[in-house]
Image (cartoon, rainbow, N blue to C red):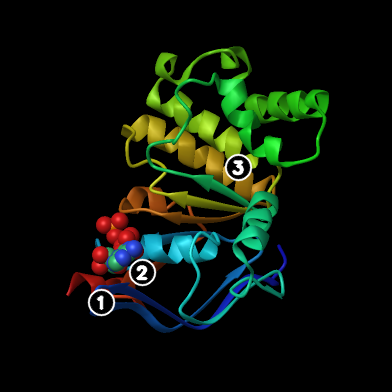
Amino acid sequence: MTTENLFELKNVAKLFTKGKETISIFEGLNMHIKKGDFMAIMGPSGSGKTTLLNLLGGVDQPSSGEISFDGQRIDNLSESQLAKWRANNIGFIFQFYNLMPMLNAAKNVELPLLLTNLSSSERKKQVATALELVGLSDRAKHMPSEMSGGQQQRVAIARAVVSDPTFLLCDEPTGDLDRQTADEILEMLQLLNSKFGKTIVMVTHDPSAAKYATHTVHLNKGKFVKAEELLV
Ligand SMILES: Nc1ncnc2c1ncn2[C@@H]1O[C@H](COP(=O)(O)OP(=O)(O)OP(=O)(O)O)[C@@H](O)[C@H]1O
């Protein structure tokens, strides 16, 4: 495993303005994520976990400070540059799968590829590979409503990896699943990290989910703290 940083956050601040009120979520936040990491982010509700994921995923931009990905600044990209950067580099996995209900599994997995220049036959090939990876080749024509929660999350994982991004961002990926199904999903994420080299950041409230990560960081009121500090 290389020790090179994939992400570097330097002195990042994030403010939200609502009317006359300004809420500061992060101030002077520094962090790095190494290539090959599987990082779990834990912390109480409102501590800034989703805000941080949104900054890492280029869904939102910092109020000040620098965010670099693979040595290149992303905090100063335009909306369209960011959209292109996201499509090339990031796979998103959400708690409630976020599949399109009117599309079958294969069509859902194909969605990110519609933003690329791949031909229809190349897209089909990549979709088949991604569905095979998550063990759902036999469900390609099934609609989300015909699949269990665990199967829908596996379709979402196939969609996240179909364009072969370096980095996977997971927001409570097992929050809606029973223990056994959650463990299967977490084993899959672990495999994507260890065998396929994906760098993963996963927000979770579940300490047993965090155990699948290579390390865990704890956020409290917008700051990284030691686990013990969360308990007091
Ligand atoms: N668009 C926004 N406008 C104003 N305030 C916001 C906005 N988004 C988030 N916040 C505030 O930022 C703080 C951190 O929210 P965030 O969703 O990042 O927390 P979280 O740790 O992910 O919480 P949870 O575990 O409940 O999902 C909260 O106080 C929230 O109200």
167 lies left or right of 184: right
Number of numbered tags placed on the structure image: 3
Cα gap from disc 1 to disc 2, whole angstroms: 9 Å
Which class describes the residues within 10 Å of circle 2: few (<14), some (14-19), or many (20+)? many
Q: Which of the pair 41/57 is nearer the observer?
A: 57
Cα gap from disc 3 to disc 2, whole angstroms: 24 Å
Q: To which residue does mark 1 refer?
A: 229
Q: Which of the pair 218/18 is nearer the observer?
A: 18
Sooner in the amino-acid sequence: mark 3 or mark 1: 3
Residue plotted at (72% across, 67% down): 2
Q: Quadrant of the C terminus?
A: bottom left
Q: Nearer the viewer, mark 3 or mark 2?
A: 2
Q: To which residue does mark 2 refer?
A: 218
Q: To which residue does mark 3 refer?
A: 191
Sooner in the amino-acid sequence: mark 1 or mark 2: 2
Q: Is residue 38 above or below residue 227?
A: above
Visible in this render: residue 47? no
| Kind of residue sitting beneath label 2 | His
| Kind of residue sitting beneath label 3 | Leu
Instruction: Give the residue furthest to the left.
Output: 232
Cα gap from disc 3 to disc 1, whole angstroms: 31 Å
Sooner in the amino-acid sequence: mark 3 or mark 2: 3
Q: Quadrant of residue 96?
A: top left
Q: Are marks 1 and 2 in contact (CB under 8 Å)?
A: yes
Quarter containing ligand 1? bottom left
Mark 1 secondary-structure assignment: helix
Which class describes the residues within 10 Å of circle 3: few (<14), some (14-19), or many (20+)? few
